[in-house]
Amino acid sequence: MAQIGLDTPLKGVVGARTANRLTDKLQLATVGDLLRYYPRKYDQRGKLTDLAKLVVGERATVWGRVVRVTERDLGYRGAGGGRGRGRGGGRPPVRHITNVVIGDSNRQLTCTFFNQYHWARALPVGTDAMFSGKVSTFQDKLQMSSPTVAVLSDTSGSGERDDGAALEVIESFPGGVIPVYPLVDGISQAVLQQSVRTVLDLRPAIEDPVPDVLLAEHGLIDLATALQDIHRPRTHEHLDKAQERLRYDEALAVQLVLARRRAEAKRFPAEPCPRIPGGLLDAFDADLPFELTEGQRAVGEVIAADLATIHPMNRLLQGEVGSGKTVVALRAMLQVIDSGRQAVMLAPTEVLAAQHARSLRQVLGPLGRGGELGAPAGATAITLLTGSLGAKARKQALLNIASGQAGIVVGTHALLSEGVFFANLGLIVVDEQHRFGVEQRHALRTKHPAGSPPHVLVMTATPIPRTVAMTVFGDLDTSTLTQLPRGRSPIGTTVVPAAEKPAWVERAWERIREEVGKGHQAYVVCPKIGDEGGGENGGELFEDGTVFDPDADPDADPGAADGKRPPLAVTQVAAMLRDGPLAGLRLGVLHGRLVPAEKDEVMSAFARGELDVLVATTVIEVGVDVPNATMMVIMDAERFGMSQLHQLRGRVGRGSAPGICLLVSEAPAGTPGRARLDAVAATTDGFELAEADLELRREGNVLGTAQAGRSTALRQLSLLRDRDTIERARTDAAGLVGDDPEMARRPGLADMVAAVIAEQEQDYLDKG
Ligand code: ADP
Ligand code: MG
């Protein structure tokens, strides 16, 4: 046989039947696919699995020692006779049951076999064997029904085993480190182990796509050795080295995808919009009622320079709530308008879009009243375009946008997908969009509605841990505003333990009355909307699925889900407050089920000070800016994630009066839920909380990777632990891609990206 390589089909290497199974069940078609299918864990020979860690309902592979075997004959003697193997046709009637119990005096697992008469002989008491199957319970005992069983070849007398097809004999591994692969139905450990061994024994030619200099620089081993040792580690040290190398490959593959995106974007031409003296931006700066913070000024200069180049800007602007990102964005928009182009600002919700339009009009004053009587020369116009506009207003708005009269257009994302026609779009500002992924941004740049690609500025107040910024936002250049504008008041946060100290809750309502008495306003936030008309599906009752869906939001306290009472609802709490502790105050209700016009009306009334208290869901999480609001009470606070609580409390203390945030919770002291609330109360550092959140999340959720199928990508890489590797890979990727986004000069690397990140998994970049 000619020498095999990574792209050699498995068929013809491991036998047609096995190859077909590997392809059908695990989508492994080539030698490379198989070698990149890494073990999930490693068992040490002689070390038995801790049965206490098994999870009912999941597949597991355990090493166990047989402690008892019982057989039961049900006495039925059908047409097939006593000892026949009921093959063919439907399921044969159960005539015989063997129970093989493994474990120790603490914990036991019963493996049950039906109509297979050989197990008692094959697995005598004292045998160590590997059992793979789904864990269930039967009469309160852990059970596995018809598991596949493997014994090591060097345990007693493997040579003469002829006792049944179901017993697999696996070889002993060097160093006693036994790989355990992730399994699916129809593929056993032994099939994978043997296939890998067959392939490795043929010594495939493996060319290393990563240049030697990089390997040497980072002290990494070559790919051939790494693939050998990840499957058949000679020692734990060899295994560590192999994992280190393959983790780097994963980090590099991700960063290559991102570097390609950046290089691709940079190849596009853009119309430069240099700063033009004497334009709108200068006029705006001259009238600014406050001084820009140092950070605002510095970031402003970077953006001004980006806009002046012949390639599109792609920049992420991070900054705590209240750090003044909007002014930075507005100044960028004005610079673009000064070059005769348009700017659009996209918000995640209609409420926010309307609010942005309102506040931009206010901040710009006469400079934003272009086309109106008495506006200064060169003034521009601001047009709001949302789904809730009436037909006539919409037509007018579209006309303003198409004619170029609207210098600034504000709307939601629908605005771009609806094919709105711009006269000359130069800049897209995306506000508060952490759910807007790499691919969506890529689409923004390439399927842009204007002639040449617009500049893109993405803004977020959600602090992003550095590793996440490098992956989920890795296609962007980043800037951060670290400083709050002068005069911004600190927010004091206190946990109100509702179960232990009910009087504190009463006090919370009194505090609201006191704030209102001083002329201020307050928010009350609840996890749920309310149940009237909600129908069968409880999920509808929540805002956007962002809250208290333990699957979608793993950083919310999972224990809260199966708690006794349902989460508090806006409608219910509003009614309770109106008739009780807050009677006489002006209460408004805001949530996602209101029609947009209603939402906007409530929000504007609150902004105008015509409402004292706003009872709301997380619709107010991002961007809502009412400086006169000084207090927030968050009900069932343990049901929110830490970052989310931080976002929410950022809504108060936006004016000069100090802000108060009360986290009301029935979570008992000492529970994880309560500990998270204490952590939020103890710090005002959003980055710290974001890192803590990351630790609590399953990483797959951070990256949005699907767990199903051939999930080889990013299995070795951890965003928490591998920060250094990710940073190195980012630098390397930038150098390797250079100005060659197709990586035409490095086909080996392109292949590696494809091998490490399966096509469908490149999508994960979409779901930041
Ligand atoms: P965010 O970063 O949360 O979007 P905003 O841009 O909404 O913050 O700014 C919050 C408030 O601070 C606004 O009312 C804005 O006018 C005000 N602001 C922004 N920059 C400054 C500054 N340098 N000095 C004083 N106030 C400022
Ligand atoms: Mg904002």
Image (cartoon, rainbow, N blue to C red):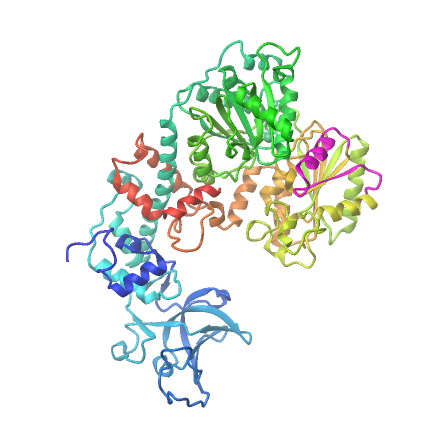
Q: In the image, is residue 36 above or below residue 318?
A: below
Q: In the image, is residue 177 above or below residue 768?
A: below
The location of residue 467, given as percent across then percent down, is 45, 40
**Can see residue 187?**
yes
* Count of numbered tags: 0
Q: Quadrant of ligand 2?
A: top right
Q: Quadrant of residue 581?
A: top right
Near-viewer residue (458 or 687): 458
Near-viewer residue (416 or 242): 416
Q: Residue furthest right?
A: 584
The location of residue 341, given as percent across then percent down, is 50, 19
Magenta run includes residue 120: no
The residue range painted magenta reads: 581-610
Q: In the image, is residue 721 above or below residue 414?
A: below
**Can see residue 729?**
no
Q: Residue furthest left?
A: 1
Q: From the viewer's perspective, is 240 left or right of 57? A: left
The location of residue 218, given as percent across then percent down, is 31, 41
Magenta run includes residue 603: yes
Q: Quadrant of residue 394?
A: top right
Residue for point 38% across, 54% down: 710
Q: From the viewer's perspective, is 511 left or right of 405? A: right
Residue for point 47% across, 39% down: 437
